[in-house]
Amino acid sequence: KVYKEYFYDATGFDTQDGGYKELETPDVEPNPIDILNLLKPDQETDTDIYYTVCAQTGETQILPGEKTKTWGYNNSILGKTIVFPVGKHIHVTLQNRLPEVTTFHWHGLNVSGPYVDGGCHAPVYPGEDKQIDFTLNQPAATNWLHAHPCPATAEQVYNGLATMVIVTDEHEASLNLPRTYGVDDIPVVLQDRTFHEHNQLDYRADYDPDGVLGVTPLINGTVNAYFDVTAPKIRLRLLNGANRREWRLHFDDDLEFDQISGDGSLLPHPVHFTKLMLSCAERADIVVDFSKYQAGDEVILYSDDTPILTFRIKEFTNDRHTEVPENLIDIKAPEVDPETPVRKVSMSGMDEAVMMDHKKFKMDRIDAEQPVGLAQYWDVTNTNGRKGGMIHPFHCHGMSFLVISRNGHEPYANEYGYKDTVAVNPSETVRILVRFDLAGLYMYHCHILEHEDGGMMAQIETYVPGEPRKHYELMTMDKL
Ligand code: C2O
Ligand code: CU
Ligand code: CU
């Protein structure tokens, strides 16, 4: 079966309280897409791997003329792509070389919160270096790193603090999927920005409490980007790294493509599409088969009607013979005890009135708790009306969940793998199955970054039953 429509309610998009801005094609020459090189480990042994991740200021040639002041990780914008192998003991030195406090949040990594996880209780001050270490036990997937200080996440990400984190494991490596980085395995960070005088960003000028939309598509920090295709099958690791924008993606000729992976794992089976919508922070690995095209052809990827990335077909000199198998992974949902109550979570309001569970976020208040190892359903409701409401992408730190149902119906066809972010339509309740494996303190929030900063966020403590509770050093806004 090939899905030819977006899965979402059209009523849930474009409304933005009247403030929706469409993407515009920038009037600049085509530029080769920045592939965002892999970050080299400082050291690697059979058991351990060491990295240094430095948040720094920089200048990036995005438009012709003056460079744009941007921030990035080991880079002037975005960052180098980080690869974390499952099972190894991972050590990371976090360096802050910015003029203000930041945090390093590993979105999608099942690591302990709040300190390693890098939410708002894990500040790294200007000039400071901090060490963290952890071992991953989770499926291979495309994850990411982004800044998460409270309440400046949105502005810091807008400045450029976001980069891809690829988790690898033996199972995924045993499949014959495209995985030659930069050749047939390409990171695609989808963002939108508005450029002001002297080619600069001006977050405050563009501020909207319902989320900052830019008019210029910026793909891996490149405007009017193209990629030279030298292999017939290309894997695109799509990451919606925008503050607020949903991407409605489709190719020329309604070219079909396969989604093989979601936020937190491969999908059990590939899903065939001509149209895919990604809400904020969601990831999708897709494989596009260009073999029917010939050298010299061009195939454009659009969001709505705006071209965002051009594939220039070259000779297929890198035909490693990759394929997309019908069976990608087995997912076994944990059993839920029928006695376990269903947790109710609500995202309400718009603009400055946004709330999570009827409250505004407070850094020094713990809102909920759940024992480690317990499988529990969460019913996540978006209370916005179907007219004029917004999609709120719900995200929780510290684990990946399974999507069970949408308003009592089957989830979308591409929601059968592990996820950590799920788009909840206006007036919809999405049931997810949540199990934490690590004791800690974790945030959950809407991933429209201005809603998160605006208070549509809460935190949950997980604990090992029968063991003494841990003590967490909770920051407050002014201590930060
Ligand atoms: Cu991607 Cu709490 O964030
Ligand atoms: Cu996260
Ligand atoms: Cu929201």
Image (cartoon, helix red, strand yellow):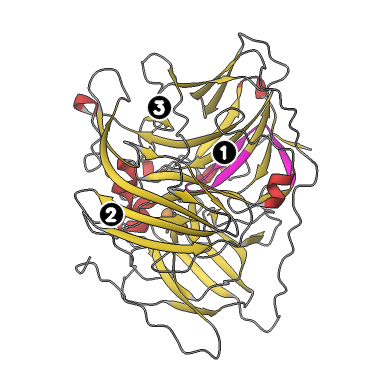
Name the residue beneath numbered marker 3: 222
Q: Closest to the observer: 266 or 368? A: 266
Query: At numbered mark 2, what does the secondary structure look like: helix, strand or loop?
Result: loop
Q: Amino acid at mark 3?
A: Thr
Prevailing secondary structure class for the magenta stretch in the rendered image: strand
Q: Relative to residue 1, is residue 456 drawn left or right?
A: left
Tell me if mark 3 has few (under 14), some (14-19) or many (20+) residues whose alpha carbon lies within 10 angstroms of its own: many
| Image spot of residue 145 (x, y percent) | 43, 50
**x and y percentages locating residue 340 in the rendered image:** 64, 81
Is ligand 1 within 8 Å of the beta carbon of the residue shown at mark 3? no
On the image, numbered disc 2 is attached to which residue?
152
Image point (53%, 79%), residue name? 370
Residue drawn at the location 58% of the way across and 45% of the way down:
9
Give 204 or 53, whichever is nearer the viewer: 53
Q: At 61% across and 20% down in the image, what residue appears?
A: 252
Mark 1 lies on a secondary structure that is strand
Q: Cβ–Cβ below 8 Å for labels 2 and 3? A: no
Badge number at residue 400: none
Judging depth in this view, the residue of 416 and 112 nearest the camera is: 112
Quarter of the figure with residue 272: top right
- The image shows residue 212 at horizontal and vertical percentages of 34, 43
Structural crowding at the residue carrying mark 1, measured as other residues with C-alpha within 10 Å and reported as few (<14), some (14–19) or many (≥20): many
Question: Where are the magenta residues, as a range?
Answer: 269-285
Specify whether residue 118 is in view. no
